[in-house]
Amino acid sequence: MLIDFKELDSFSGNSTSPLLTEERACPVCASTSAKALFALSNFQFYSDCAQLPKRTYIKDCQCLHCYAIYLNPAYSDYGLEVLFKEAGMSYGSSDGRADEEIGWLFEKGLLNSGTTVMDVGCYEGAFLAKLPDGVFGIGIDIDEPAIERGRSNYAGRDISFIHGDFESFECEERPGVITMFHVLEHLSRPVEVLKKLRSLADNRTRLLVEVPILELGATNDINGFFSVQHMTHFSRQSLANTLARAGWKIIDRFEAPDYNGCRVLAAPASVEEDVSGDPNDLFLVYSYFSKWYEELGKVEERLMRYKELGEKFIIRGGGAHTEFLYHMTSILHSRKRSYAIVDNDPMKSGTTWRGITIYNSEALSDVDWSDTYMIISSYGSQEKIYEQAVSDHAVPKDRIIRLYDSLRVY
Ligand SMILES: [Zn+2]
């Protein structure tokens, strides 16, 4: 397949709608005093589209009362629907960590026979399906097709699936254990959701919440810790405050720096209306940004080698990492260059991003590399993509640009 190289931003139909976002107070303490930490305008969610608004204004703020860091404005329900259509609306517990998660609960003595475990943000129910025999599962998700798949995949198992909103779903059962793995950071009203879960709990109920935290957030990924898909960027303190405001007290914890998971186990407690922050969270912000900008500088330094080279660039990867490459580095802004994107996702093939056509990886085999470079726009999959390009598509090694010398977690 012959690749048609295009100029960047040659598609001009992308629009922004004020309906995508809405202003809010601090999702942890409800204060309206905050300062802006980081902002990107015209952030585009995935492919070009003249019908639906896909661009928005990303701004992360820090609360001046409790120091919680949050997206403000946050996505509206309509915004979430539009922006995440291509990414899927679910929070996706398809990370393959279910065995470890269940082992952890088991060690804590929380999976005795007869217990009911409620997984909030269960997606297709992969976690619940791994619970030991004699333990009942309840799964809740807003993604209706995922809930339907769960129902049909695990028919005959002791799992019931509920499709619904986390604040208003109906459930008669009283769970012994409630789990939320990497869900809370995606919610615009985390305290209200935790209050809803508190209303289902009795004194023996335990709530497991796992989120990424700022303390473990420093890596050399240009995407950084402030994921555009997260509504709250938790720290240890702001997570504890969020739980306290909903009537939960942390009684145990575990942290996994390798994938940035902060897991806490909480028990019902009285609601703390007025939580105070820890100034340490301000220190954490400065420390995080100093590392992140240093890493961005290293990536930019690498890319400067290609400043004068290559008339054509293939961007290998058409996801959110490429949007960050656009905003945070110079590599896509040379006026003398034209671009194409190659991505393995069949959903993306044939669509465009900022006017650049997306092809599947077979297209790499037909490229004339004499004046063309391929830039790998991925963090976690950089090495895999490099090896495949060389072995499957005979891309010359000296034409491949890698952004990262290694993947590092601080
Ligand atoms: Zn606050």
Image (tube, rainbow, N blue to C red):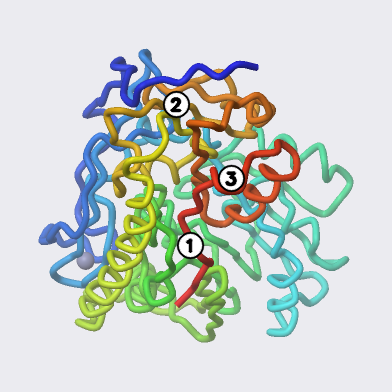
On residue 154, the disc is: none
Q: CA distance from mark 2 to mark 1?
A: 41 Å
The answer to whether the residues at label 3 and label 2 have Cβ atoms under 8 Å apart is no
Query: Dot 1 corresponds to which residue?
Result: 199
Helix, strand or loop at mark 3? strand
Which badge, 3 or 2, is on the more N-terminal residue? 2
Residue 6, image x and y in percent? Answer: 41, 20
Q: CA distance from mark 1 to mark 3?
A: 18 Å
Q: For residue 61, which quarter of the picture?
A: bottom left
Helix, strand or loop at mark 2? loop
Q: What's the residue at 30%, 37% (across, down)?
A: 43
Residue 104, image x and y in percent? Answer: 69, 78
Q: What's the residue at 71%, 36% (across, down)?
A: 393
Ligand 1 visible in quadrant: bottom left
Q: Nearer the viewer, mark 1 or mark 3?
A: 3
Which badge, 2 or 1, is on the more N-terminal residue? 2
On residue 47, the disc is: 2
Query: Dot 3 corresponds to which residue?
Result: 141
Question: What's the amino acid at mark 3?
Answer: Asp
Question: What's the amino acid at mark 2?
Answer: Ser
Between residues 44 and 360, which one lies in front from this camera angle? 360
